[in-house]
Amino acid sequence: MGFIGLGVMGQPMALNLARAGTHLVVWNRTPARCEPLREAGAEVAGSPAEVFKRARTVILMLADGAAIDSALGRGTPDFGANVAGRTIVHMGTTSPGYSRGLEADVRTAGGGYVEAPVSGSRKPAEAGRLVAMLAGERAAVEAVRPLLRPMCHEAFTCGPVPSALLMKLSVNLFLITMVTGLTEAFHFADRHGLDRAQFLEVLDAGPMASGVSRMKAPKLLARDFAVQAAARDVLMNNQLIADAARASGIASPLLDVCHALFGEAVALGHGQADMVAVLHALEARTAGQAP
């Protein structure tokens, strides 16, 4: 199997595959990110084309459509050679329209295509506890499903492309609004002089507690902005959801407020920080200093 894209999510995902005994060939634009995979027994390719030559199924965990197109050689004569007779598994987050077009091009070139975005951030990725959403032709989906087990504890078949990405965007809408609400509540308690640790205890004892609150609330208390899911990536996801909502005439008022706040957090220089860095945007608004 091939794996291209060893970023915040891709590296722990690929490591789980390698540690489970999967024969893996990997490539990343920044070569240093490959070293933990080499130590885990994976082979490191010198280029994306080498990955395609050596693997029949190739997972792409890349930042955006431009990075995917570059790795695949899409739009060049190399594209057909890279994808023909192979199954391309798109596990990143792009627009549904992009994925639909990519599937058409891959299939025209004689390849198979599975859309397989995941729900979860760095910690679940490290623990192999991601949730996969799968879309594509049934035979290709069923062939790929067992390959994802070292990375994902659940996998749901959502239908044809781009149903999996639309499901991922639906889940992300809830995540974004939930974490933004948690952060605003924390900011409200803080500015009223309440015991912030006690606020977290009250939250954790009640029905609003969740895996997300238990992961993010301690980060707020400690002002720990080490990245699990970067604010810049959340803003990108927010834009994708907003675009999909506008294209379908769907109202998204909560998302739109979050979109503005994450845009402000990134403008304040916190794009590389964890998504709880949206706290900086709230603090700036309270101080009358929003960008």
Image: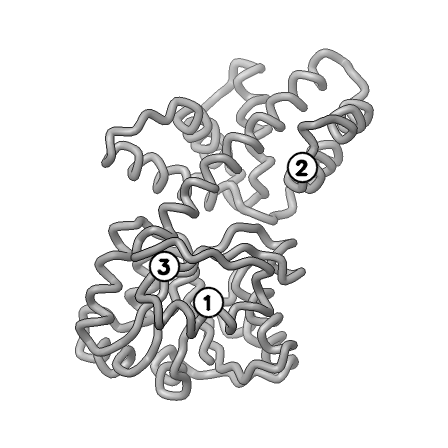
Q: Give the percent coordinates (x, y) of residue 19.
A: 65, 77
- Among numbered discs 2 and 1, the one appearing first in the sequence: 1
Report whether 97 appears left or right of 26.
left
Can I make out residue 185 in this image?
A: yes
Can I make out residue 29 in this image?
A: no
| Coloration mode | one colour
- Among numbered discs 3 and 2, the one appearing first in the sequence: 3
Q: Nearer the viewer, residue 134 or 91?
A: 134
Of marks 3 and 1, the one in the foreground: 3
- Residue flagged by tag 3: what amino acid is it? Ala
For marks 3 and 2, give the CA distance: 28 Å
For marks 2 and 1, give the CA distance: 30 Å
- Which residue is rendered at x = 38% and y = 63% of the image? 90
For marks 3 and 1, give the CA distance: 20 Å
What residue did someone put label 2 on?
210
- Which residue is rendered at x = 46% and y = 28% of the image? 258
Q: Give the percent coordinates (x, y) of residue 84.
A: 25, 81
Of marks 2 and 1, the one in the foreground: 2
Q: Nearer the viewer, residue 215 or 211?
A: 211
Task: Assign a secondary structure to mark 1.
Answer: loop
- Residue flagged by tag 1: what amino acid is it? Gly
Q: Nearer the viewer, residue 103 or 93?
A: 103
- Which residue is rendered at x = 67% and y = 28% of the image? 208
Q: Quadrant of residue 141?
A: bottom left
What residue did someone put label 3 on?
135
Q: Is residue 104 above or below residue 122?
A: below
Task: Assign a secondary structure to mark 2.
Answer: loop
What residue did someone put label 1 on?
5
Q: Quadrant of residue 239?
A: top left
- Residue flagged by tag 2: what amino acid is it? Ser
Query: How many neighbours does mark 2 have within 10 angstroms: few (below 14), some (14-19), or many (20 or more)?
Result: few
